[in-house]
Each structure stands twice: as structure tokens, then as C-alpha cells.
Amino acid sequence: MERLIEILEDIQPDVDYASCTDLIDGHYLSSLAIISLIAELEEEYDITVPAVEIVPDNFNSAERIMKMIERLQEEY
Amino acid sequence: MQLSSLLLAGKGKSLTSLFSLLYLILFLPACIVGYTLTPKKWKKYFLLLASYGFFWLISGELVIYLIISTFSVHYFGIWIDRLSGQMKAQLAELPKEQRKQAKAGFVKKQRGVVTLAAVLHIGLLLVLKYSPFFTTNVNTLLNKLGLSVSLEIPKYLMPIGISFFTLQAVSYIVDVYRGVIKADGDLLRLALFMSFFPQIIEGPICRYSETAEQLWNVKPIEYRNLTFGLQRILFGMLKKVVVADRLNLLVSAVFDTKNNYQGGIIAIGAVCYTVQLYMDFSGSMDAVVGTAQIFGITMPENFKRPFFSKTISEFWKRWHISLGAWFRDYIFYPVTTAKKMKKLTSSARKKLGNHYGPLVAGSIALFCVWFCNGLWHGSAWSFIFFGMYHFALILIGNMLEPPVQAVNKKLHIDPKRFWYRLLQIIRTCVLVVIGELFFRARGLRAGLDLFKRMVTDFSFSTLDNRLLKTLHADRYDFAIVGVTLLIIFVVSVLNEKGVCIRESLSKKHVVIRWAVLYALLLYIIIFGAYGLGYKPVDPMYAQY
Amino acid sequence: MPTVIKNALRALIFVLGLVLMLFLLSKAFSPAEGTIADGVHSIESNGIYAEAENSIDVIFLGDSVVYSGISPLQIWSEYGIPTYCCSTSAQKLWYTEDMLRKAFSCQSPKLVMMEADALFSKFNFDDSAMHKAEGVLPIFKYHDRWKQLARQATGDKSNERTAEDYKGYRLNFKNKPAANTGYMKQKLKIETLPSRNRSYFKKIKDYCEEHGARLVLFSCPNTKHWNNARHKEIAKLADEYGLDFIDLNTLTKDVSIDWSRDTRDGGDHLNYYGAAKATAYLGKYLNSLGSFADRRRDPEYQSWNDDAEGFLEIIAKKTK
């Protein structure tokens, strides 16, 4: 989780990722930030984020992002 | 736009829009009565029948394209689903280490099927819609090369709405592949999703997960839904008949005649066209959503007060929403998340930083989106230009973001201040109007010519009563358009604040309720631009 | 009472209320009949009401090609036959019928010349429904008079239209050459008269017969809407009812239209130069029938001489 927040802060600073729950709906993360984020996540966690996963629900909070990562890691 | 209207099958027929009398006083009432009388179990089949009847009335025997498309997505969906089933069964038997490889094999196969389906559907659209454009350009090229061969320009009858139902078909196939939905085993349910009559002409482009179940589990008509739906249609009529149709003669005088108007007049024409397009298209959407509501179905909204947008990219999230969402989900994200693109993003971010890094891959994807968007709107260079224009604007917006933020910080400008936002909104509207000028012009050359005159000769000195006469407009026309826009503006602001006008109206005393409805009806009847001397707008998005 | 019936009743009352209001509004919006202001579409279309009673011998019916292509004052100055163009743009056949009735309410022409272009102008369900509604509740026809009412209320005289009196002809000197000059040789289309149009035509024919007027079909030169197939179809129709049919499109020897000079909009409408040629032929035709007296010396027609003089002066000035 800490690593994830580091990545997020690296991409888009000045957001309180620990508590924010509307990263997408509140326009904190732009679509460009999402593109960076996905590239980083794939490298960091050895997963593939398919286009279908790119929905606000999966990216609205750090917690949600972590859940998605875990789910994708379990998949084979 | 005229270029692509060459081959409209529905021309000369009555049922060309949801505001035609044939629809409003015959088709829709007949549907409501028939639907009510049909036993509950059969209601969905009644809707399907009505939808095909509707399509038949507008497109005649071209209904065959819709039938073929429906069969095709049905079987492709089942095929993809079956592959998924096989994959699951096999993977369960394999040890964990081998799963990844086995899965890759299946995914490859599935991708092949999805690609085949997409190529077939989009290919059909390309052939029907773009082959005249394509062969014309090839001929010009051959001529330029000094070859005197010329290909025969093919002519196809294009069914109305094919650009919409093709996108629905592709989204269904891809969603099945992505596992968002399961393939529909019931051909008729899928057929209803593809053909539901209010949306077949001009969208919105629905996803299977949004409407298919709703349409299949139809409920009896409720009084409340009926009145709310009819009121919504009436509101759409206000936009279309009072504003859009009233501006038609003026717009067509500026864009379709060779009167060399002054730059200021062209600007007025461009603004009027933008207003007209918005009123016509969003009015039609009101009719679509209203009709669906009568049958208890919630359609996705296609407009969210676009002219309050602060940037061009925000504008496209509020204007023709279902099309933008389609391009986002089926072009933008797939392109940016392709393996090579991700690598590009990672390496570019290291060199160019957080903002410009992802912009490289993002811009490539955006280019694809806007090229397709332009082409989707019509087969002519002017539409490709229109797409590229918006691509350039969004790209420039993205590039300028960091410097603008820096400047604001230095000058202590708070971008959340009212006047700052107002300036942003005005700037966005001006850019949109310029885009629509090219969109409406008859061809790219005409558009560039109009634009040049607008910029170099910007003056209103020739604007007098005589000129207005050639524009078929007088001060009363402008007054009534202004008043109507004001009404619509107030409604928009109330909607923005979350007030549902129909809801609050329904709680009022019957006298007030009826007075409002009577006022609206009489307003449309008296101030509507119909009858001798007026020419209604062709539904603009129907030819796509 | 079950809610369904209650709601249905409520809806019925609502609709009745609406109809009542529309009825009252119709009274307020309809102009006095038989006045120039009755011409909702254009003042010119009702100009015939301004003519002295029973003074017109021939009327021309049809859409915009008629008021662009036929100049009654030219016929007057050459042969002394009083004629009038009863035409409006994009005229549908029922409107043609209305115009015919209007004309006969104050005139008793001996000859009705009907232009054939309007015969092909299709009308769909919406058109007929609207036309019926206009008959019952005239507000649908006269709704646009709110502008006039607003003008009266505010005393605004800025836009009052004064019809320049060329007896229904609209003078135009614009020029945009036509490209499609081989239009009568194209062999692609089959044109058939829609059955609704046919029945309207029959009504018009019967009306003329009842009022003792002869009906003649004719067609103005037009590269955009006319073709050989239409010619054949109308010739057949004329044959069927034993009517004369003059197709100026085929009479290229007598009416030599120069499509680079004689049209104002690329072959759809004639300008003054084209109209002069078409009118010259039709004037000769009317005269050759031998049933019209030359009224140029008739004291009751002196205003016609004055109008013609004014018209010719303007022409002379413009064509200099």
C-alpha cells in the first residue's frame, strides 16, 4: 500500500491519497495520469491491466486500486 | 454534411424524425395502446415488432442490414463465450505454471474472433458509407498522376442509423470478450437491444449492460411515466420546432448560397448553426429519452449542458456523451494500454516528466480517436478536418497546461474565480463555434473560405433590414429565439442544481400544472417555425 | 372510480381544453377573408384580391417557377390580355386548389394555365394531416401572424411589405449559369404522378370545368426539376383528359433559353431574360387561341397601361 501511494504521489503530487475516495470523479487524476499509473503498476506488480478495468470504480481511491491489483495478481 | 446525405433511403417518406406528425399522432399513440393491450408476457415482443415496423417505415427493405448485423453479433458472441468456457475448463485441469501459457493461446484465439467480427461490421459500414468518398479521391489521385483511368463511383443505399447500430454491435462483441457481459443466448432479446425504435435514428449509442435487460423486462405503462415522458418530448419539441427550425433558413442562406456575406454575418451564421445543431440534436434526444420513459425504460443521457464547459476536452464529455464514451472505451484505452504504448509511456515519463511523458502515448491514442470521430461524422475531408481540429485543440490544451498553471501562480490568479471560469467558458464556446463552421460548410474548401472571410472581414456594417431579408430573418425571429433560449437556459441551470422540474411540477396544484403545460403547448404552436415559408431541419445526425 | 378511468377522463378534459383554446386563438389570428393580409405566405400570393372584379382573363397557377418565369405585364403590353400569376414558392397541390378558389372568388378567368412542376411535388402524411388541421383550426395556418400582430401592437412599420405590382411576377436579374443543359436527354428516371397528386389534379380540373374555364397544362424551362420522363408523364395525363400541354422545355426552337445567361440559380428558376423568352411564347399562344380581346384601349384597364409603362421603364433602366 505504501509503495502504491509513493507511485501515486510521484505521478500526481498534492493529493491526500490515504483518505481521498473520489480520485476520478473529483477530477484529481486526469486520463493522462491514469495512463502513467497503469504503466507503472504493470511494471511494479507484474500484472496486465486490460482496458476493461479502466473504470472510475477501480481508481477512485488508493484502496480500490490496491484491490484491483490484488485481483489481477491472482488471475493467471 | 450534404455530401453524405446523397443516399438517404428515407427521403420523401414521412417518418424521418421523432417530431414528425406521423410519429407523434399515429405511430406513438398506436404503440402505447397496442402495448397496453398486449398481455404482459408478450409486451417485449410487441416492442420488438414495433421497432422493426418503425425501421421498415424509415428504411424499407434496407432493414435487411439490421437483421444481418443482429444475427452476426449473436453468433459471434456465442462463439467468444464458448471459447471462454473451454478456456476455463482446460485451465482448471492444468497445473498453475502452465496456465499462463495456455491462457495466452485462448486469448489469442478470442482476439482473432473479436477482430473478425469488428472487421466485418465496421467493414460493412465503411463500404456503404465511405466507398464513394474513397473512389473519388483515388480518381483525383490517378488524374494527378496523369493516368486517365477512373474508377466507377459506387452508390449504395445506406440504411438510416447504421452508424449507430454498428457501434452498438461492436461494443457488444468487445464487452462479451472482455467479460463485462455474457453473450446473449436469446436472439430476440439481442434484436430488441439493437433495434429499439426511439434510438435507432440518432442514438444514443447504448451498451448492452445499460438497456438490454430493461427492454426485455418491460413493465406496464404507468401514468407517471407516461406524463413525464410526454412532457420530455414536448420540451424537445420546443427546442426543435421553435429554435432549430426557425434558424434553418438563416443558416442555409449563409452556408448554402454563394452570397458573399461579410465576416460578421458569417460569424452570426456559425453561432446560429451551433445553436441549431445543439437544439436539434438535444431536442431529438429529449424525444428519445421521453419515448423510452413512457415504456418505463431509462436511456443514458447524451448531453450535459455542454456550453458550460471550460475546456474542449470537457466539452466532449458533455456533448454527444455516448459517442465520446464509445471512443474512450473502445479506442482510447485499448490504444494506450497496448504493450508497446505502455513501454513508451514508462520511458517517456522518465525523460519528459509526469505531464509530458504520458502525453506521448496519449496523443497517439487521441489522434486515432479524433480521426475516427471525424470520419464517423461523414465521408468528406471537411469532417476529417473537423476531427483534426479538435485533436489539435485538445493536444494544445494539454501541452499548455503546466505553463499556464505556472503563469497563474506567478500572477496570483485563482483559476476557480468566477470571471476566470467565465472567460474559459467563452473561449471554449468560440472554439466550438469555429469547429462547427467547418462541420457545416459544404466541403473543406468552402469552410476554409468562410473562415478566411470571417477573420479578415470581421464587421457588421452591412447588417440592415435588407440584409436580414436575404437571411430570411427579422428582429422578431431573433427575439423569439432569444426568449426560448432563455427559457431553456433557466431549465438547464435548475437541472444543474439538481431540481427535476417535472417532479416539482407534478406536486403543484392541478391548475398551475395545466397552466404550465398549456402555455408550453400554445407557445410551440404559435411560435413554432412550421408551415408555409419554413423549412424544417433534416434530423442532422440521422444520416450518420 | 378506478384510477385508469379517472386519468383517461382527466386527459380528455385536458385535450378538450386545448382544442377550445386553439379555437379561440384561431379567431384571433385569422385575418379577414378575401384581403391581401389573408395571404399568409406572401402578400404577392393574394395580390389578385387587389384587382378589379372580373377583370382577369387568364390565371397562371403553380410554384415558384411561375412567378419567376411569366410576366403578365409583358403579355399585356404585347397583346392586351389581362393575366395574373397565382403562385407561391414550393406550392403543394392543395394550395394550388386554394389559390384557384381564391382567384374564382373575385374573378372569372376563361383560361387557367397550370404549371406542371407542382404536380410532382410530393406530400406525405404530415403534409395532409397539417392541411386537415389547418382547415379545422386555422391557428395552425396563421400562427406566424404573431409577427404582424406584434407589429401592429408596437406600431412598428419597419418591415411592412409593399408588393411591387407586376401582377404576380417577381422581377429578378440575378444570373448563375446552369450546368446540366442536357437535362431533357437524360434517360434514367421513371416518373409517375403520386396517386394523391392525381386526385388533387382531378379536383382542380373539375373545378375549372364547373366554372366554365378551360384548363391548359404547361411547363416552364427548368434543368433541375424537369426531364424527359416528367414530360412523358404529363403528356399522358393531358392526353387522358383531352387537355393542351405546352412544354417549353421541348420547344427549344421557339423558346431558345441560353442556360448560361437566362437563369438566376443554376437552372431551377429563370431570371428576367429567361422569363422574357418564356412569356413571349406563352403570349403568342394565348393570342393564337383567338378568344381574348385586346383590352389596351378599354378605359377600365387604363391602370394596366400605367403599370406596364412603369414595368417597361424599370426593365429599360436595368438592361441598359
Image (spheres, coloured by chain):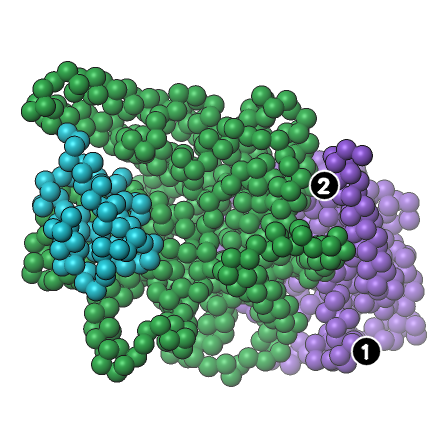
Chain colours: A cyan, B green, C purple
Q: Nearer the viewer, mark 2 or mark 1?
A: 2
Q: Is residue C127 above or below residue B221?
A: below
For the point 76% across and 43% down, the residue is C11
The quadrant of the picture occupied by the C terminus of chain B is top left
Residue type (three-letter) at the residue carrying disc 1: Asp
**Would you say residue C279 is visible in this rendering?**
no
Q: Which mark is residue C40?
A: none
Q: Is residue B521 above or below residue B202?
A: below
For the point 51% across and 53% down, the residue is B282
Left or right of residue B76, residue B34 in this image: right
Left or right of residue C313, residue B202 in this image: left
* Crowding near the residue tagged with mark 1, few <14, some 14–19, many ≥20 C-alpha atoms within 10 Å: few
Q: Which residue is mark 2?
A: C197
Q: Which residue is mark 1?
A: C306
Q: Position of residue C116 (x, y in %)?
A: 69, 48
Using the image, name the chain to which the residue with label 2 belongs. Answer: C
Which is nearer the N-term, disc 2 or disc 1?
A: 2
Q: Position of residue B307 (x, y in %)?
A: 45, 64
How far, Cα to Cα, is label 2 from label 1? 40 Å
Q: Position of residue B407 (x, y in %)?
A: 23, 78
For the point 38% across and 41% down, the residue is B129
Left or right of residue C295, residue B13 in this image: left
For the point 58% across and 31% down, the residue is B219
- Count of residue discs: 2
Q: Position of residue B504 (x, y in %)?
A: 63, 55
**Would you say residue C23 is visible in this rendering?**
yes
